[in-house]
Image: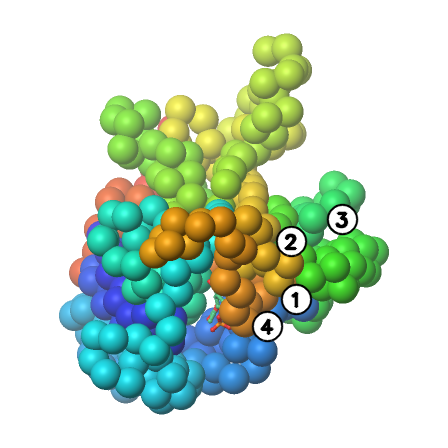
Amino acid sequence: MLRFLTAGESHGPGLVTIVEGVPAGLEVTREGIGLELARRRLGYGRGARMKIEQDKLEIMGGIRHGRTLGSPVAVIIRNTEWPRWEEEMSPDPGTPKRPMTTPRPGHADLVGMLKYDTKDARNILERASARETAARTVAGYLAKQILASIGVTVVSHVVAIGRAISESEQLPTIDDLPSIDASSVRAFGTEAEAAMVSEIEWAKADRDTLGGVMEVLVYDLPPGVGSHVHWDRRLDARLSGALMSIQAMKAVEIGDGLESSRRRGSDAHDHIYYEDREFYRNTDRAGGTEGGMSTGQPLRVRVAMKPLSTVMRPLPTVNVVTKEAEVAFRERSDVCAVPAAGVVAEQMVAIVVTQELQRMFGGDTVEDFMVNVTSYRTRLLSF
Ligand code: EPS
């Protein structure tokens, strides 16, 4: 089963990802990973850093002549910002020039300083930064390649930025992904895009930040992925945990989620029909999961991001050295990172779905994996 570790600080020498459990024979290109990294850099409202970072990657293992070997895939992404920050931040090893002593409310700063016993928030924020998600992108890309081998597609789009909400009921499919990626806020539909952009402009002018909501959809997943038999195998539980692991996420909703809690049972579920040897539903209120398993309907998950905590109009805090009231430190940041976070959400969903498919179907090679999935799909047709 696919698993991965990341290492590296936001302004350190670079980010490292090791992905284990990738089947052999998967087509993987440096360009493919690079394109995925570029998608994560997009979005109106991002700061200067994203124009600076090139996300140049080096493949250190697991891939030969454009195909995976079955061994761990290792990738390094060097931080363009490293030399400048190294000079500025640590004139003498261990004694930073400017320790950051006024933690930002909402960030990992204060709790991290208490826990790891440091009076310099930089020791915490460097790893807490969402720069780490660049490293996750490598695992997300590999997962999506595995899913593509069996025709499963994953799409994300931004449904809200601040108070600007997309009203469209229509769900985008993989064919809509190019137009979503071309949208400056990764919205599906131009009307929503205009409202979201002006929301960001308003926040920027006000020296403030914004959060929002992203939706991830998975199509053509066979029924039965995940399991009702144990808490840690439930697909919806695993998706929620993975999405909440993304920096700054505060809520996850599966299907109609909160709305279904306000409905009656007669109006809350997806009725079952049968035609052409297949069971199907006319609605997808459950968001494609029942009993912790995929139903075969599109998987539909939303995740909400809080506004970034580096606010140019700084919030009240306490200096951890003097214990005096002060305002939180400010440094270069983004006004809104929701479009980029949506790409990361897409990747985390792809990773979890891939893991659960691998648990069901195994396969040391992509070919074995594909054969096993096909045989399961055939069995369902003769149920
Ligand atoms: C981030 C702050 C900004 C973002 C960064 C996440 O970085 P900096 O302070 O260096 O300008 O650009 O995001 C990335 C570097 C990235 O690759 O997504 C933060 O505070 O989390």
Near-viewer residue (258 or 366): 258
Q: Mark 2 and mark 1 in contact? Answer it, CB < 8 Å.
A: yes
Q: Mark 2 points at which residue?
A: 210
What distance separates the C-alpha of mark 2 from that of mark 1?
9 Å
Q: Which numbered disc, 2 or 3, marks the residue that appears first in the sequence?
A: 3
The label on residue 163 is none
Is the residue marked by circle 4 packed among few (<14), some (14-19), or many (20+) residues within 10 Å?
A: some
Mark 2 or 3: in front is 2
Whole-percent x, y for residue 175 in the image: 64, 62
Q: Which numbered disc, 1 or 3, marks the residue that appears first in the sequence?
A: 1
Q: Is mark 4 on a helix, strand or loop?
A: loop
The kind of residue on which mark 1 rests is Gly
Which residue is pictured at 54% across the width and 71% down the height?
A: 332
The label on residue 164 is 3
Q: In which quarter of the image is the C terminus?
A: top left
Q: Name the residue under label 1.
A: 45
Which residue is pictured at 16% across the width and 70% down the height?
A: 71
Rendered view: 265 above or below 233: above
What distance separates the C-alpha of mark 2 from that of mark 4?
13 Å
The kind of residue on which mark 4 rests is Gly
Whole-percent x, y for residue 93 in the image: 20, 80
Q: Mark 4 points at which residue?
A: 47
Q: Is residue 161 left or right of residue 123?
A: right
Whole-percent x, y for residue 156 in the image: 57, 55
Near-viewer residue (150 or 117): 117
Q: Mark 2 and mark 4 in contact? Answer it, CB < 8 Å.
A: no
Near-viewer residue (323 or 58): 323
What distance separates the C-alpha of mark 2 from that of mark 3?
11 Å
Q: Mark 1 and mark 4 in contact? Answer it, CB < 8 Å.
A: no
Is the residue marked by circle 3 packed among few (<14), some (14-19), or many (20+) residues within 10 Å?
A: some
State whether residue 171 appears in this view: yes
